[in-house]
Amino acid sequence: MVSVTFVTAKGEKVSAKAEAGQRLLEVGQNAGMPLEGTCEGQMACSTCHLVIAPEWFDKLVPAVDDEEDMLDLAAGVTRTSRLSCQIELTEDLDGLVVHVPPEARDMQGR
């Protein structure tokens, strides 16, 4: 199991457990985070944007150019921003901390 802590825009911490191999988007949605994921992981939107805690950012597989291009369209992007649909959780990421940007929008009402 991989443990992930989501920090909401209000500073609330929400812990979630995931299986290695799961995408961070799915884990966040299951934990009630406002991650729309409109394109269902096809990197055609930026509605699953999260900010990775700086101490975890370099442990992730680097973003590809297409992901960087989509992040350019997201609101509230930082140096450690990523699309959660592109992060596959591994045992090395156990304890991962991510922040939900204040600009997060979820049309599904989560």
Image (tube, rainbow, N blue to C red):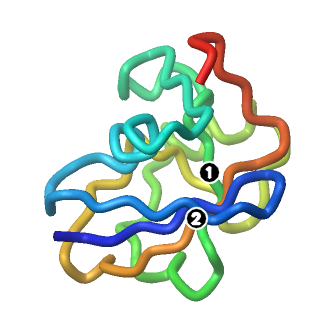
Instruction: For the residues labelled 1 and 2, say whether their Cβ atoms are less than 8 Å apart.
Output: yes
Quadrant hosting residue 51: bottom right
Is 35 situated left or right of 21 in this image? right
Name above or below for residue 31 compared with residue 108.
below
Q: Is residue 20 left or right of residue 2?
A: left
Q: Give the x, y percent position of residue 66.
A: 49, 37
Horizontal arrangement in the rendering, residue 3 relative to residue 35 (left or right): left
Q: Residue at x 44, y 44 (%)?
A: 31
Q: Quadrant of residue 49?
A: top right
Disc nearer the start of the sequence (1/2): 1
Q: Amino acid at mark 1?
A: Leu
Give me the C-alpha separation between circle 1 and circle 2: 7 Å
Q: Which residue is mark 1?
A: 50
Image location of residue 103, percent across then percent down: 83, 36
- The amino acid at mark 2 is Val
Secondary element type, mark 2 = strand
Q: Residues within 10 Å of mark 1 (few under 14, many from 20)?
A: many
Q: Is 101 situated left or right of 33 in this image?
A: right
> Which residue bears the numbered disc 2?
98
How far across and down, in percent of the image, does residue 85 sit? 40, 40
- Dividing the picture into quadrants, the one containing residue 13 is bottom right
For the N terminus, the quadrant is: bottom left
Tell me where residue 36 appears, x and y as whole percent. 55, 23
